[in-house]
Structures are given as structure tokens and as C-alpha cells.
Image (cartoon, rainbow, N blue to C red):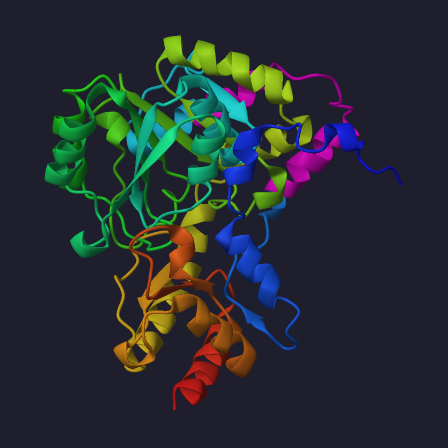
Amino acid sequence: MPNLSSSLVGKHNQRLNALAPSGIRSFDKKISSIDGLIKLTIGEPDLDTPEHVKQAGIDSIKNNDSHYADQTGKKELRDAISNHLSNKYDLKYDADSEVIVTVGATEALYSTFQTIINKGDKVIVPTPTFALYFPIIEILGGEVIKVDVSEDDFILKPEKLKAILDKHGDSVKALLLNYPSNPTGVEYSKEDLDGLAEVIKQHPMYVLSDEIYSDLTYGVKHYSIANMLPEQTIYLSGLSKSHAMTGYRVGYICGPAEFIKKVGMVHAFVVTSVTNSAQVAAAEALINGENDPVEMAKIYQERRDILYKGLTKLGFSMPEPKGAFYMFAKIPAQYGKDDENFALELAKKAKIGVIPGSAFGPGGEGYIRFSYASSKEVILEALKRLQIFMK
């Protein structure tokens, strides 16, 4: 096994030196070897990909669909994405010029940031949030403006956004929104988005709207800020959560044609094109599986209700999730605010795995995140163990 030449040590992208490892993955790895651990850590649906979706992927392979696909994505999938967004969210994107299929929403994020960020550009990110955004922005030479919204019901308020923009001016290249939110499950209302849109449209900036959980909501209607600001919004989503297809790695970017042409160049350099069988499966999911997320959401909502009721009884406080499959619980005051230590003790003594809230940026301190993408039986057992631990 070769060792790197001593003359090459340190000769890499120096921005990598400043990047911290994923707080979610590193903590999960730290506790995963604990015997008998119940893991409510990673946002991985435990439900199976629907049978008709799997079969479509199998048929693609059997039919020798093994040549390069169009770099922007198979036509049938781009059409399916366009129709899905139009029918469900009243978003109008031309399948041929305003949609690109990506290797999951992660590549959608990376390619989009790569397209817009020049060195020193600032990106506003409300926190606590999915921490993957931070290193992507930083490795590309951008600067993250982390805005703690934990005291505002985990919603970015227009007046707070305006104050930040007044301070930083045109050096702000974009605002990143993620809703329903990871880690809180909080959803933005139409009124929330209207207020933000009024501020944003006065500035030459993008809105990157990560709406990967939009098909998994509970008792509320999902609105996209792309309806209010189509000319400034880059819409990001995928099939991983809605159809339990994390391993298929299919995401997409939608936006104005001028932008899509540019991001298409980055996408082509990075991946060339997305795997054919995964694209065919994704098209089947959107064309004939519109009801699949509805049924999955019913299951997640039942689990949410069990976990919310159980945690509330034990003295935790949290926003009731309106979407996604996470619960962001504030640790009872008598246990202090050291969320990492609390989560570590919970793993060692109660054999329950959760993620410390500080992994999600400012405002996450003193919280822990539960993923309820696990069976009802597992959640009930976790609550039983938690009750014993807290006694």
C-alpha cells in the first residue's frame, strides 16, 4: 500500500483544513458500537421503496438501458418532475430548459453553490439547520452568515433578514431556506414566505430553497417561495425522502433557464449524467406513485404523535413538527445545556442514540434531535428506556 510522497504532504485544497467533520455522522459513528443501541440518529427512512418503483428500475436494467443518458436527465423524468411540481405546488418549470436531474439533493446543492459563489460571497443560513450547507459554502470560498432563529419559533423573520441585508449589502449572494426543516420539522407558512419575499425582491440575491421534505407534511399545506419569487429562486428537491429512495440518489434543480444553463455546465463536469435505472425508477415514482408519500406521511405522523406525547410527559419541550421526520427537543433544565454530553450519557446508559443539537449550528445548543424514521415499536421502546434514564 503506497504512502503519499513526503513532497506532496499538505499540497491539497487548503480550505479543507478548516472544515469540521459532520457533527451528525461523527456522533453517530462515536456511539454506533454500543451493544443494543436504539438508533434514532440518521434521517434514513426505514420504509421500503414502493414495489412498482423498484420494478421500473429492474426493467430498465433488463432492457439494456445502459448508455449515457442526457446530461440534464432523461426526458421522461424531467417531464415527470415538471408535471409533479405543477400539479402539486403550482410551480411552472419547462422540462427542457428549466430542470436538471442530479445525483441526489446533495449534488443539487453542491452544483448550485458552485455556480453562484465567488470568493468572499456571503450566504445567509438560518440555524439550527442541516449542517452540510456550511462546509459546501466554505470549501467554495464563500462565507456563511449563520442566523440563530431558535428564539423566533425556528422561523426566519422578515425584519431579521432585512437587518442582516442592511448590514452586509450586496456581498450577500444568497439565502438558503430548508423547510419542512431538518432538524426541527418546522414548516414556513404562506404568510412567512410572503414577508420574506418582500424583503428579498429588493436585493440582487438568490434564494436556494431546499424542499426535500415537502411531500411529507402533517395537517398543513406546503407552499414554495418559488411561487412568490420565481425569477430569484433556485428550487432543490429529490426522491430520497418522499419515496424512501435514499440509495437511488436522484435529486433535481429547477430555476430560470439562464441559471439552469450555467448550473448544467457544473453538473456535467462533476457527474456527466445520473444512473439510468435510478432515473427510470424516479420517473415511475412521480408518474404512478403520487400517493406513495401520502401513505408514508400517515405512518410518520402516527410515530410523531407517539414521540411528541412521550417526550412532553418526560419534561422535554419542542415545536410540534409539521413535516419531515425529526423532533428537536429541548433538554429539561435540570440536565443543563451540554447537549453532546447528555446525548452521550443517553447512548451509554439508556442505549438510545440521538444527535446533539449543537451539530446543527447556533441555536441548537441544549437540544437533541430524534429521528422518527423508525418503527412504532422502536420508538415506544426508546421512550420506555428514556423514562427509566430520567428517573
Inspect this view and state whether residue 46 appears: no
> Which residue: 32% across, 27% down?
122
Q: Nearer the viewer, residue 1 or 160?
A: 1
Inspect this view and state whether residue 13 appears: yes
Horizontal and vertical percent for residue 146? 30, 42
> Which residue: 67% across, 35% down?
57
247 relative to 263, above or below = below
Q: Where are the magenta residues, as a range?
A: 53-81
> Which residue: 32% across, 70% down?
337
Q: Nearer the viewer, residue 150 or 185?
A: 150
Horizontal and vertical percent for residue 290? 44, 40
* 319 sits to left or right of 328: left
Residue at the outermost bottom position: 391
Horizontal and vertical percent for residue 46? 56, 58
Residue 119 quadrant: top left
> Which residue: 59% across, 68% down?
31
Horizontal and vertical percent for residue 160? 14, 40
Which quarter of the figure is the C terminus placed in? bottom left
